[in-house]
Image: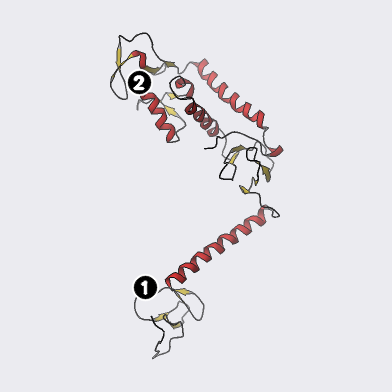
């Protein structure tokens, strides 16, 4: 899975190195501010193995050396349960995590659990927090499936042709597709609409042929019979034989095998 970063789209986008530093600075500042405020912090008691407590998740009796809590709510949990809780929430792509107690709204941050959670989970969680802080209009992803790098547009100016700083392939930042050579955005959209219509028409014709639908001899509209005799009346008013496609005349006898 590709890792997401705030990276440049040619000169119109933030410098790769600077953007990476900004991301790191944003996360560090956010963490430091929370630490200064002391709204939440991890307390893992050690050296008190002779005492135990009841975990708020599994309800087992656990030694205090395995206890996790925060100074803001003091709801005690064992480190194993907290680790599994974070893992499950992150697999569900939840970015903002709260204390597992259903009646508690204290927020759980990566820095609070970094000593008991695998480093890779922390890194991905921090990246998700950073990505969620970017306005929807500013972010996009490299359109190539084997890249999909997160990119941030910091400029008000309209940007079209761009190079992905990761895979180094050109794409259109407006159409969000690989670069449409020899076409501007409007021409590409018109071409795409035509392609979509042509593809839909091809699929419809394939279905009509496979189901052996008949065409009205007057307006050429496809007609599907769901039962009854071969005498069909199209909505254009034409009467025809569904079996052979010829005009229906009173007393018509069809010699075409059904």
Residue 6 is labelled as none
Name the mark on residue 77.
2
Q: Residues within 10 Å of mark 2 (few under 14, many from 20)?
A: many
Q: Measured from the top left, where is residue 55 in percent x and y?
A: 31, 20
Q: Looking at the image, is mark 2 or mark 1 earlier in the sequence? A: 2
Name which quarter of the figure residue 190 lies in: bottom right
122 is higher (above) or lower (below) than 155: above
| Residue at the (34%, 75%) spot, across then down | 227
Mark 1: give few (<14), some (14-19) or many (20+) Cα within 10 Å. few
Say if residue 159 shows up in the picture: no
Residue 56 in picture, x, y percent from top left: 32, 22
- Residue at the image position 41 percent from the left and 27 percent from the top: 98
**Image quadrant in which you'd find residue 223:** bottom left
Q: Which residue is mark 1?
A: 226
SS of the residue under disc 1 = loop
Quadrant of the image occupied by residue 146: top right
């Amino acid at each position: 899975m590709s890792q997401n970063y705030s990276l440049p789209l040619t000169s119109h986008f933030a410098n790769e190195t600077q953007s990476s530093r900004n991301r790191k600075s944003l996360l560090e500042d956010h963490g430091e501010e929370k630490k200064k405020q002391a709204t939440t912090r991890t307390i893992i008691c050690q050296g008190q193995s002779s005492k135990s407590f009841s975990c708020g998740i599994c309800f087992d009796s656990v030694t205090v050396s395995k206890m996790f809590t925060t100074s803001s709510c003091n709801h005690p949990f064992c480190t194993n349960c907290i680790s599994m809780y974070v893992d499950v929430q992150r697999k569900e792509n939840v970015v903002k995590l709260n204390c597992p107690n259903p009646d508690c709204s204290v927020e759980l941050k990566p820095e609070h659990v970094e000593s008991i959670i695998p480093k890779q989970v922390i890194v991905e969680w921090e990246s998700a927090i950073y990505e969620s802080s970017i306005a929807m209009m500013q972010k996009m992803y490299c359109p190539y499936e084997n890249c999909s790098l997160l990119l941030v547009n910091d400029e008000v100016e309209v940007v079209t042709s761009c190079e992905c700083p990761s895979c180094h392939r050109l794409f259109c930042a407006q159409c969000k597709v690989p670069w449409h050579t020899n076409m501007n955005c409007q021409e590409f959209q018109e071409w795409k609409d035509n392609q979509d219509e042509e593809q839909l028409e091809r699929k419809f014709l394939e279905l009509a042929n496979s189901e052996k639908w008949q065409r009205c001899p007057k307006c050429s509209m496809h007609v599907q019979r769901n039962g009854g005799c071969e005498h069909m009346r199209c909505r254009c008013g034409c009467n025809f034989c569904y079996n052979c496609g010829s005009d229906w005349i009173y007393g018509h006898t069809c010699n075409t095998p059904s």
